[in-house]
Amino acid sequence: MTTFRFTKGQATGNDFVLVADPEGTAPLSPTQIAALCDRHFGVGADGLIRAVRSEHLPEGAAALAEDPDATWFMDYANGDGSVSEMCGNGVRAYVRFLVDTGLATLGVGETIAIGTRAGVKRVERSEDGFRVDMGRWALRGGEPLVSAHGLEVDRPGLGIDVGNPHVVVALSSNTELEALDLARPPVLDPAPPAGANVEFVVPAEPLVSGGIGRIRMRVSERGVGETLSCGTGAVAAALAVRHWAGAGAPDRWRVGVPGGVVEVAVAGAPGEERVTLAGPAELVFDGNLELPSPVTAG
């Protein structure tokens, strides 16, 4: 059996198991990760984040080449054990973990560079949470047809890449949004080779208030299922609605998810726009757990 210490964290209800492994000597197998994240037999989480110094991972070497200040790498896996590029809520929970456990120091207004498989992300601490520079975004993935249980007619989605792939679907009402059954994952046609997170969005009425756009969202994450929140999904949803709204659409958006509210902001010239994501993150509890050792071929 393998015994280790873990921390449970959450950011607008998107929850994570966080493990400190600074020297990168205790990797977890996909089976172990899935067991940890299982909500009936494990700790329960949407994903697992391992805190490793960038110098001890091949992907971390790429992060250090991009930014020598990216001392820490966010080794993130979905709840089913599959590796993922990035998680906007997860990186906020990760920085909270680094700070609260003394692995890093970060005062209000200060910024830390974090290595991820989607490049280096800079995270600023605020009075009430963290703001993540998510980098550039792109329309990518076309407009696949999306079918979902509870949705009477298949709808076209919009492919958006914010470091990981998303497909955003516009719905007509809150009633339609609430009628969705996301216990079973939506089906995309054509299916993206690496899969995609799927966001269903409804604009508020009015869409813009005080210069800020407002939408509601539910999301089905690949390798997880429906979650209470998805940071990169909130970014993709805001960008999609802004794209559909056309000229004059605001650059600031408030995205309501089942687990709370996050804020998305866009800045920069067309083609070079960068996006930030802001919201809370907290650690919930610590514990020790025994897991079966990974099976090796004999």
Image (tube, rainbow, N blue to C red):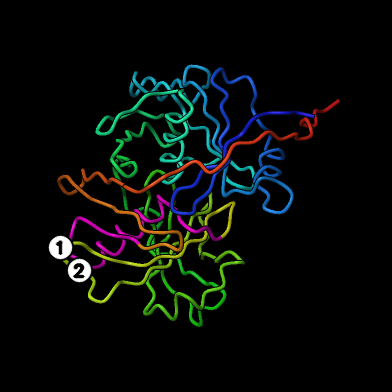
148 sits to left or right of 267? right
Name the residue located 21 percent from the left edge and 47 percent from the top edge: 271
**Percent coordinates x, y for residue 283 in the rendering:** 49, 41
Q: Under tag 2, what secondary structure?
A: strand
Q: Nearer the viewer, residue 103 or 84?
A: 103
Residue nearest the observer in this picture, 256 or 68: 256
250 magenta-colored: yes
Mark 1 residue crowding within 10 angstroms, few (<14) / some (14–19) / many (20+): few
Quadrant in which the N terminus appears:
top right
Quadrant for residue 78, please give it.
top right
Give x and y (percent) for residue 298: 86, 25
- Disc on res. 208: 2
**Residues in magenta?**
226-255
User: Which amino acid does the dot numbered 2 rest on?
Assistant: Val
Residue 122 horizontal side relative to residue 52, left or right: left
What crowding class fits label 2: few (fewer than 14 Cα within 10 Å), some (14-19), or many (20 or more)?
some
Residue 211's disc number = 1
Q: CA distance from mark 1 to mark 2?
A: 6 Å
Tell me the kind of residue under disc 1: Gly
Proximity of marks 1 and 2: CB atoms separated by less than 8 Å: yes
Residue 181: x, y in percent?
57, 72
Residue at 61% x, 43% y is: 82
What's the residue at 52%, 22% (across, down)?
57
Front residue (pair 89, 110): 110
Horizontal side of 17 relative to 210 (left or right) equals: right
- The vertical placement of 214 against 33, above or below, is below
